[in-house]
Image (tube, rainbow, N blue to C red):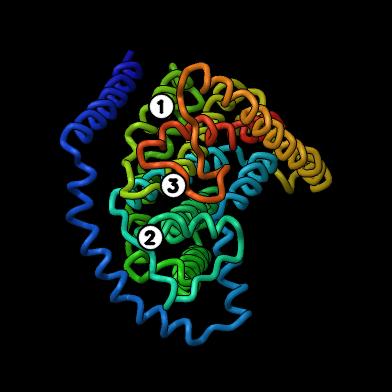
Amino acid sequence: MESVVWQGLALSGIFSWIVITCYFDVTKKIRSLLQPWVSHHVVSGTSIILKIQKHQHKFLDALFSGLSCIVSVPFYTAFLPLLFWSGHGKLARQMTLLMALCDYLGNCIKDVVSAPRPNCPPVRRITATKDEEENALEYGLPSSHTLNTVCLSGFLVCYVLSYTQSEGAFVKLGAVTLACLLVGFNGFGRIYLGMHSLIDIIGGLVFGFMILAIWLSVHEYVDAFIVSGQNVTSFWAALSFLLLFAYPTPEFPTPSFEYHTAFDGVVFGIVTGIQQTYHQFHHEAVPRIFTSQLTIPTFLGRMLVGIPTILIVKFCSKALAKWILPVVSNTLGIPIKSTSYVPMLNGSATDKKSSLAWSVVDLVPSLFSHLRL
């Protein structure tokens, strides 16, 4: 009964927040306060970027472009299944939830502030991948790469030290040092690539440490609720739906809402799948890699079967959605626009809710396939 009460209070609180922010136009009021200040620092920080880019080199271009891929969508798509298949289901689901939290809050802040990225030119912007080209369409503050790197590397360090039960000061110092170096190189690389100004990186660090601190204090409770709570699937479905409408409307349209919607679907797939199959496939006694129960050949076999399955399911679900959704939208009279399927931004800020269906099917099936392999 207590679980039902707090679930109701949580959903009611989010719904109330949606009503209040819409009625009082909270997003525009916050933006009017923060956007001029941030934009000023972006412009004044251009000189720092240009000084850094004077030392440009092909090796540095490749190095920092590669580091940027560590927290990209293709990396998530490959990394999360590997964690599940290696037997570290708890780490996999907690990393997924943390990534979704970072993605949602980071993009919310971006679209509330709606501050520009550094002007190009004079700044040289390097977008080595399609994912980077899409990132460049988003607003600047905070740097999502910096925020995500802080949270993911910080949580991974805490998990590994806890899992190995290491008490050596040298090991802890080494792990923290590696995480700090990764964060530092990533943040510096975002400036070098012309994707962010210094204020964006500072914002990513500040919000990243705040989110990490909150997550470290609640992640065990969240995980316990997912694996053994009441009304988990129905609560998460309602939560996911409300969060779509709680998302702020940006000054001009960006792909940020669709990125969040996709990860919203990922989390819902994870939660539903684990809730149904926890005792069969995701319990703590499941075989883990580098043990006699899960050998390297077996793990590689999972990869050889799983990765093609994920790609096939993802491709087929998109094709099916592109065929079914126009029929449904025409029948119901709901326009569907999506920046993920159209090269240029062709929607408006009010079109973001209509892009929901396209974005959800982008990743949900792949996560269900992760859970069943």
Q: Which residue is mark 1?
A: 241
Q: Which residue is mark 3?
A: 256
Question: Which of the two labelled residues, at mark 1 and mark 2, occupies the earlier sequence position?
Answer: 2
Q: Which mark is residue 311?
A: none
The front one of 232 and 346 is 346
Q: Would you place residue 241 above or below residue 89 in this image?
A: above
| Residue 204 in the figure: left or right of residue 153 | left
Quarter that holds the C terminus: top right
Instruction: Classify mark 1: helix, strand or loop.
Output: helix
| Residue 177 in the figure: left or right of residue 139 | right
Exactly how many numbered labels are in the figure?
Answer: 3
Q: Which residue is mark 2?
A: 140
Using the numbered discs, state the Cα–Cα distance from disc 3 to disc 1 in whole angstroms.
17 Å
Could you tell me if residue 296 is visible in this image?
A: yes
Amino acid carrying label 2: it is: Gly
Q: Residue at x 51, y 44 (%)?
A: 339
Amino acid carrying label 1: it is: Phe
Quarter that holds the N terminus: top left
| Residue 70 in the figure: left or right of residue 290 | left
Say few, some or many: other residues with alpha carbon within 10 Å of mark 2 (under 14 / 14 to 19 / 20 or more).
many
Provide residue 237's location: percent of width, then percent of height: 45, 23
Q: Would you place residue 64 above or below residue 237 in this image?
A: below
Q: Which of the 4 image quadrants contains residue 204?
A: bottom left
Q: Residue at x 66, y 35 (%)?
A: 370
The front one of 206 and 260 is 260
